[in-house]
Image (cartoon, coloured by chain):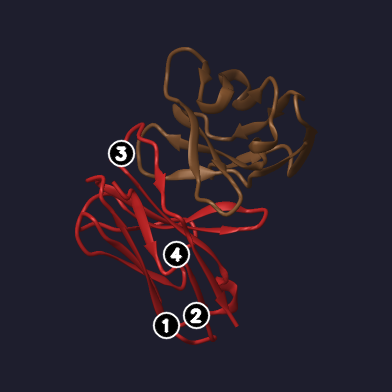
């Protein structure tokens, strides 16, 4: 099992450009999540998908959109990147609601200039 | 809003010293509690978790944590740290229903050889 995979690993964007971060998991998990990690702030939830076909906003959704393409894949889109979106983005998955732990991908380091 | 605080931003220890990292949360209902570790350049990995039962839980690599409900705390401990424990440690809280995990800001541990 590859677990949770993310592409790309690194990306540099200019202000106003758009891009999509890809995430896939091969553990047959129902729930998937997107976080951003900033120094001193821990991980903050951007969006999550409790199950295929559903998505919900997290703590910091502004400036982002998501698509749960199928059970395996959950993408994060920045329509018009801003320097404030410079961060490390982590995708995670879990079996579902309840007590299940989350499994994390390796992260995407995004810089917006 | 539910929040998670970690007492120390950066802890520096010598090898063989004992470790205790504090974690407090603000939610009053039933919660699930987690400690994750992020080694330099890597993604988050689960160290241990508490769902119910014995409030003293043991995790990987000799770590343990104690849930004290009256203090809303879930402190992480290790009796003797090693240089390889150098990492960032995140406490996370999840309500017993719903999807959202809330992460603390993290504590950076540096172990000097």
Q: Residue at x 48, y 12 (%)?
A: B54
Q: Which residue is mark 1?
A: A18
Q: CA distance from mark 3 to mark 4?
A: 21 Å
Q: Residues within 10 Å of mark 2 (few under 14, many from 20)?
A: many
Q: A28 or B100, which is in the foreground?
A: A28
- Assess whether mark 2 and mark 1 are in contact (beta carbons under 8 angstroms): yes
Mark 1 / mark 2, whichever is N-terminal? 1
Q: Secondary structure at mark 2?
A: loop
Percent across and percent down for residue A79 are 41, 80
Q: CA distance from mark 1 to mark 2?
A: 6 Å
Q: Which residue is mark 2?
A: A81
- Assess whether mark 4 and mark 3 are in contact (beta carbons under 8 angstroms): no
Find the residue positioned furthest to the front. B113
Chain of the residue under the numbered disc 3 shown in the image: A
Q: CA distance from mark 3 to mark 1?
A: 32 Å
Circle nearer the viewer, 3 or 1: 1
Please tell me whether residue A4 is drawn above or below residue B13 in the rendered image.
Answer: below
Q: CA distance from mark 4 to mark 1?
A: 16 Å
Mark 4 / mark 2, whichever is N-terminal? 4
Q: Which residue is mark 4?
A: A61
The brown-coloured chain is labelled: B
Q: Residue A97 shows which numbered tag?
A: 3
Please tell me whether residue A74 is drawn above or below residue A101 in the rendered image.
Answer: below
Circle nearer the viewer, 4 or 1: 1
Chain of the residue under the numbered disc 4 shown in the image: A
């Amino acid at each position: 099992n590859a677990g949770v995979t993310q592409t790309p690993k690194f990306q540099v964007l200019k202000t106003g450009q758009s891009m999509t971060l890809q995430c896939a998991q091969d553990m047959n998990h129902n729930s998937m999540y997107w976080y951003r990690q900033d120094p001193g702030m821990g991980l903050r939830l951007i969006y999550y998908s409790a199950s295929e076909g559903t998505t919900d906003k997290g703590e910091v959704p502004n400036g982002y959109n998501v698509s749960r393409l199928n059970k395996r894949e959950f993408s994060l889109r920045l329509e018009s990147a801003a320097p404030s979106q410079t961060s490390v983005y982590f995708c995670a998955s879990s079996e579902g609601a309840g007590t299940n732990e989350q499994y994390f991908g390796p992260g995407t380091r995004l810089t917006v200039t | 809003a539910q929040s998670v605080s970690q007492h120390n931003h950066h802890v520096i220890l010598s090898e063989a010293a004992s470790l205790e990292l504090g974690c407090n949360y603000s939610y009053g209902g039933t919660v699930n509690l987690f400690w994750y570790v992020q080694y330099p350049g890597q993604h988050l990995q689960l160290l241990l978790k508490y769902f119910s039962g014995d409030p003293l839980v043991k995790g990987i690599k000799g770590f343990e944590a104690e849930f004290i409900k009256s203090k809303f705390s879930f402190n992480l401990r290790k009796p003797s740290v090693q240089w390889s424990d150098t990492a960032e440690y995140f406490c996370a809280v999840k309500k017993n229903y719903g999807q959202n995990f809330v992460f603390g800001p993290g504590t950076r541990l540096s172990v000097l050889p």
